[in-house]
């Protein structure tokens, strides 16, 4: 419930004049008289002027004139959603990234085992924070280039040892964000990145581009998808309950990221002004009219807004149908904050053919 009350009343003797006044305030006069007449004609004849003004505000807020500074010339044709590219013959593959935000003492997750010669140096440098032998779970290593045959995983996270031993996980140690080799004596003056800023380092670990060579601040996975897309493969990027820079690709390719909430996909809805029911159907025809196809002499940004709105509505309804129609074999495994997100990921993987990837 709102703690305020909107008492503003637009100027005008008739509902048409009041709607025109609202449109002038919201679009700086960019909305034509013909469009305003269509909005007025769509009102329920039995509704009060106050109700009609509220509907007019909602409709104008969906229009290109409101979201851009362009003049809009509609051509009368309904705007079609951008078609989904056909699926390629290549086998489906998915990369799932679980980004654990927060502090992470990596030196107490993977460490030299107490039987390794490096453990003495590890102990001397870690001092009170050193991982003790009774806190270690050993893992073996057969790479002769590694300094230890046996490393250790913190006993507080046995799942990481289990994943490693089963061949389902690996460790990449000594990975950090450095633009050039530095020492204890010159790192402060020779490092451009804020090494001790958690937010900065979290972003850099997703970009993996110290020099921003592509000029777009794209993420490491976004660039991988860019390469596949340029090679003709069908690719899709999803973010669960948000998106990080890791999946952002080159904007010139026109690929967007589908952001899917962990507890289900939100479709467009509207609370009716006179009931508690979904009142979206009452304004959908006018939304489609306001965002129909435009002529060549119409504004570029207005066209982009309208197409993006139609595509987003169509995409969310499509993904919602896929999500609700998909069941997980072991739903009890997908509980809690992380579990719910992995459940969404699992459903999207199951429906890869329907998603044309």
Image (cartoon, helix red, strand yellow):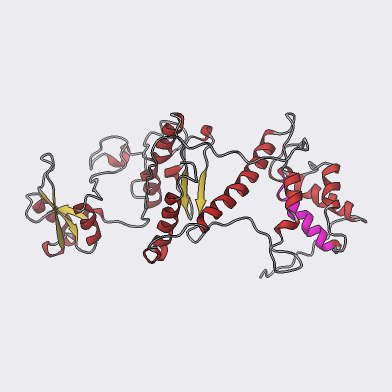
Q: Nearer the viewer, residue 272 or 17?
A: 272
Q: Is residue 91 above or below residue 267?
A: above
Q: How many marks?
A: 0
Residue 109: give x, y in percent of width and height: 22, 56
Residue 5: give x, y in percent of width and height: 74, 67
Residue 304 in which image quadrant:
top right
Placement of the N terminus among the 4 image quadrants: bottom right
Q: Is residue 145 above or below residue 342?
A: above
Please give the name of the residue rendered at 23% of the width and 64% of the height, measured from the top-left corner. 156
Please give the name of the residue rendered at 57% of the width and 57% of the height, measured from the top-left corner. 266
Q: Answer whether residue 54 is magenta in the image.
A: yes
Q: Nearer the viewer, residue 17 or 39?
A: 39
190 with respect to 230 (left or right): left
Residue 306: give x, y in percent of width and height: 68, 42
Residue 250: give x, y in percent of width and height: 48, 34
Q: Answer whether residue 116 is magenta in the image.
A: no
Please give the name of the residue rendered at 26% of the width and 56% of the height, measured from the top-left corner. 105
User: What is the magenta range?
Assistant: 50-63
């Amino acid at each position: 419930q709102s703690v305020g009350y909107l008492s503003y009343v637009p100027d005008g003797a008739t509902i048409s004049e009041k709607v025109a006044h609202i449109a002038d305030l919201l679009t700086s006069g960019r909305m034509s008289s013909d469009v305003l007449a269509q909005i007025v004609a769509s009102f329920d004849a039995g509704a009060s002027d106050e109700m009609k003004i509220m509907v007019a505000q909602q409709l104008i807020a969906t229009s290109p004139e409101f979201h851009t500074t362009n003049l809009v010339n509609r051509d009368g044709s309904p705007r079609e959603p951008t078609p989904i590219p056909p699926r390629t013959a290549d086998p489906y593959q998915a990369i799932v990234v679980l980004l654990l935000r927060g502090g992470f003492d990596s030196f107490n997750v993977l460490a030299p085992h107490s039987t390794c010669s490096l453990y003495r140096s590890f102990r001397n440098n870690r001092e009170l924070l050193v991982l003790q032998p009774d806190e270690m779970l050993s893992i073996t290593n057969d790479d002769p280039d590694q300094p230890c045959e046996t490393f250790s995983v913190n006993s507080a996270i046995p799942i990481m040892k289990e994943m490693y031993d089963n061949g389902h996980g690996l460790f990449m140690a000594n990975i950090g964000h450095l633009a050039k080799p530095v020492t204890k004596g010159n790192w402060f003056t020779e490092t451009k990145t804020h090494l001790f800023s958690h937010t900065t380092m979290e972003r850099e670990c997703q970009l993996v581009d110290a020099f921003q060579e592509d000029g777009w601040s794209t993420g490491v996975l976004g660039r991988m998808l860019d390469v596949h897309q340029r090679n003709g493969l069908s690719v899709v990027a999803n973010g669960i309950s948000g998106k990080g820079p890791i999946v952002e690709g080159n904007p010139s390719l026109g690929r967007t990221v589908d952001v899917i909430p962990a507890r289900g996909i939100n479709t467009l809805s509207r609370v009716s002004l006179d009931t508690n029911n979904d009142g979206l159907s009452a304004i959908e025809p006018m939304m489609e009219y306001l965002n129909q196809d435009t002529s060549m002499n119409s504004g570029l940004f207005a066209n982009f807004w309208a197409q993006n709105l139609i595509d987003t509505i169509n995409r969310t309804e499509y993904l919602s149908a896929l999500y609700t129609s998909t069941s997980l074999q072991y739903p009890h495994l997908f509980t809690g904050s992380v579990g719910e997100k992995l459940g969404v990921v699992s459903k999207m993987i199951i429906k890869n053919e329907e998603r044309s990837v």
